[in-house]
Image (cartoon, grey):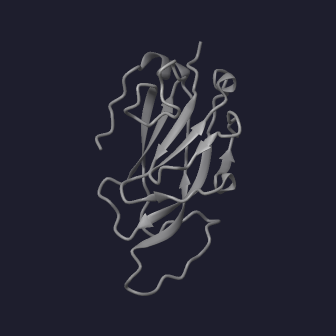
Amino acid sequence: GPPVISEIVIEVPRDFIQQVRRVNHVEILANPFRWRGNDWIDVSDPRRLRFRVDEDWSSAMPTGRYRLSFPVMVPARMPKYNVFIITVCGPAGPNASAWCSGPDDPRAMASFPLAGFGLGETHPSAPKYAVTGAAVRALPAQLLTPLIFVWMSSLLVTEKTVPRHAA
């Protein structure tokens, strides 16, 4: 059968900071996910968002586009490696940590690079900010993260090793 997805981890590029503080900061744009439990999101790491997926639903997850958006703080200078890393993690074993940490976690089944965006690009519904003064070091923006899974279960079943992102 298809692999069971337990968690999805999104790592933002270096010098970016995810700005999710409440559940309603995450906007589902297409094909809703089914989350697991009341503590389905972890926002404690400024560079990562972690989502717990309903494992029963994930084993029968329909093929389609799964997209969400969330706010990030964009640096005044874009890093050279402007790539988001999306990691799909399997279920926790008896000695696993509480949350999947990302591409290097033993539970990581696959990691996908997602090209970042250019300075000044915003989500159409993002609030507009007036930024003045030389002391401003970062610009707020709303990131439209197309978390697009054109779900190919056979890919996840046959491809066990995915090149890891070098930190």
Instruction: Kindly give the residue lying farthest to the top in the view shown.
Output: 1
Furthest toward the front, the residue is: 95
| Residue 29 x %, y % | 67, 49
| 21 in relation to 167, above or below | below
* Farthest bottom residue in view: 133
> Count the marks: how many?
0
Q: Position of residue 136 (x, y in %)?
A: 41, 79
Q: Position of residue 151 (x, y in %)?
A: 57, 29
Q: Give the residue displayed 32% in from the left and 31% down from the top.
A: 163
Q: Quadrant of the C terminus?
A: top left
Apparent side of residue 25 relative to residue 97 in the rendered image (left or right): right
**Placement of 22 over or under 39, stated as above or below:** below
Image quadrant in which you'd find residue 30? top right
On screen, residue 6 above or below 17: above
Q: Residue at x 64, y 21 (%)?
A: 59
Q: Position of residue 138 (x, y in %)?
A: 42, 71
Which of 30/26 is in front?
A: 26
Looking at the picture, tell me which residue is in the foreground, 153 or 98. 98
Of residues 165 and 152, the one drawn nearer to the viewer in this rendering: 165
Residue 28 left/right relative to 100: right
